[in-house]
Amino acid sequence: MYNIQKVIKANIALKEKLINDAPLMKTIEQIIDCCTTAFEQDKKIFFCGNGGSAADAQHLAAEFSGRFYLDRAPLFAEALHVNSSFMTAVANDYSYAEVYARLIQAKGREGDILFGISTSGNSENIVRALAQAKKQGLHTIGFTGATGGTLKKYADHLINIPSTDTPRIQEAHILVGHIICEFVEANLFGKK
């Protein structure tokens, strides 16, 4: 028999930890303010991740560039991995570790924001992207698991989900990402 309830209870237990983590709530508020200000100043938001985190990056970018709750103007948000020709060319000519840093070098401008999503916090291409972003004056936001990994060193704001279980971390990343999208949209376009 499948213990489906056990999986759901693990998800709920982690989310209860989040609710009671006052510093994490404060960090989420700071990220909401940072994103709101960036969009008010006609800046861009970029997302990067690998595997499931790449899917999360694309999902969150779409919430900003499409819509969340409100029928409103689109916002410039982009998942960096969506150009497969660029990704494969740079991975082949340089290395996979360089794919996102190179895109930030080309597209990122001071005041833009880069979200780096890595459950371990140690994905080399995500770490290099945030390091490059910091050099160029972008705001950097890390979404990781419990330790923050190497990524924490380059993140202006760190959402380190208190877990080492990849699926639970990813579920929490989407929750936090949706919270950010909801309140940024409300700040810019009015309450739902």
Image: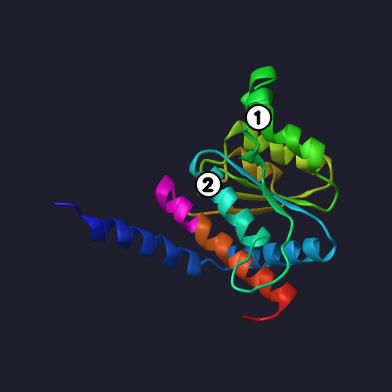
Q: Residues within 10 Å of mark 1 (few under 14, many from 20)?
A: few
Q: Position of residue 118 (x, y in %)?
A: 56, 43
Amino acid type, residue under disc 1 in the picture: Ser
Q: Indicate whether 19 appears above or below 148.
A: below
Asked if 153 appears above or below 21 in the picture, the reply is: above
When asked about the image quadrant of residue 12, the answer is: bottom left
Residue on which disc 1 sits: 85
Where residue 72 is drawn, which disc sits there? none
The answer to which image quadrant residue 26 occupies is bottom right
In this rendered view, identify the residue nearer to me: 34 or 157: 34
Tag 2 secondary structure: helix
Q: Is residue 186 left or right of residue 4?
A: right
**Residue stretch rendered in magenta on the structure:** 163-172
Residue at 66 percent of width and 81 percent of height: 191
Question: In 3D space, how far apart are the residues under numbered discs 2 and 1 (Cα atoms)?
Answer: 18 Å
Mark number for residue 55? 2
Specify the quadrant of the image occupied by residue 62: bottom right
